Amino acid sequence: MKTQIAVRNLRLCTKDCLCLYVCPTGASDTENSIIDTEKCVGCGVCAKACPSGAISMVPVEYPPQQKKVKEVLEVSYALSGNKAKEEKIALQLAQSAETDGLYRLMTAAAKSIRLVNEDLLRESGYMLPQSGNTHKLLREWMENPSTADFPAEAAGKLLELLPDNDQAAPDNDQAREKLAVTYRCTVCGHVFQVPDGEEPVCPVCKASGDKLERIG
């Protein structure tokens, strides 16, 4: 039974076509350039032969993602939202730039901001298709689409096809998190949790009351 399959990054492919000669099953020889995963036996010969590094071997079944601490997720998601706003501003400045130099500078800034934001989302688990975060986000988009033409049907199909490994491996920590309330201290910025119903006090600066902001 194969444990991995070959995938081709079409943006990197330089059409050297060495994979066509070494593939034992013809899986790499397709009309749309996408490797046929049904024919692929996972030998990895095509990936080793590809001079442009366009072919990678990926596991057939992904393991559950590394567990993320809720406090880290809250901060990462907030930073991601800020980065999205920064990218939008940079693109707007690029579109209204009166000189070529300013246009190129703002375009480069937007791209660098996008790369940082992708790292934030990746670390938060939002770019892993098998994560509970991705499933939750897809469900939220289906229930509250951002635009009238949002492909809700496609999002529903993805939910059917993609396994939720977090659901497959629940633990006691996740159950306890549901009973906790998250606060951010407006004095020192510390994010912490307390059991639902318990009076919150910042463990760092001891602030309480209206100095604390409930965020989850």
Image: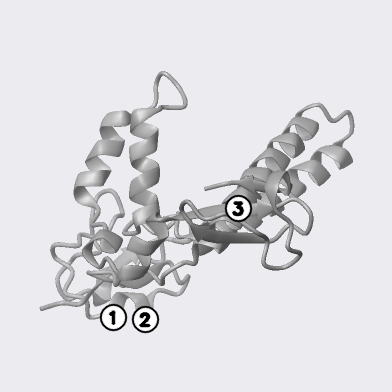
Q: Secondary structure at mark 2?
A: helix
Residue 18 vertical position relative to residue 162 in the rendered view, above or below: below
**Disc nearer the start of the sequence (3/1):** 1
Estimate how packed mark 2 is, as few (under 14), some (14 to 19) or many (20 or more) residues with alpha carbons within 10 Å. Answer: some
Query: Residue 92 is drawn in which quadrant?
Result: top right
Residue 69 numbered mark, or none: none
Q: Is 82 rendered above or below residue 167? A: above
Q: Callout 1 environment at 10 Å: few (<14), some (14 to 19), or many (20+)? A: some
Distance, label 1 to label 2, CA atoms, is: 5 Å
Which residue is labeled 3 in the image?
A: 183
Give the x, y percent position of residue 41: 16, 74
Graded by Cα atoms within 10 Å as few (under 14), some (14 to 19) or many (20 or more), the crowding at tag 3 reads: many
Marked residue nearer the N-terminal end (2 or 3): 2
Mark 2 = which residue? Answer: 48
- Say what amino acid the circle numbered 3 marks: Tyr
**Horizontal and vertical percent for residue 204?**
72, 68
| Disc 1: which residue | 45
| Residue at 81% across, 26% down | 96
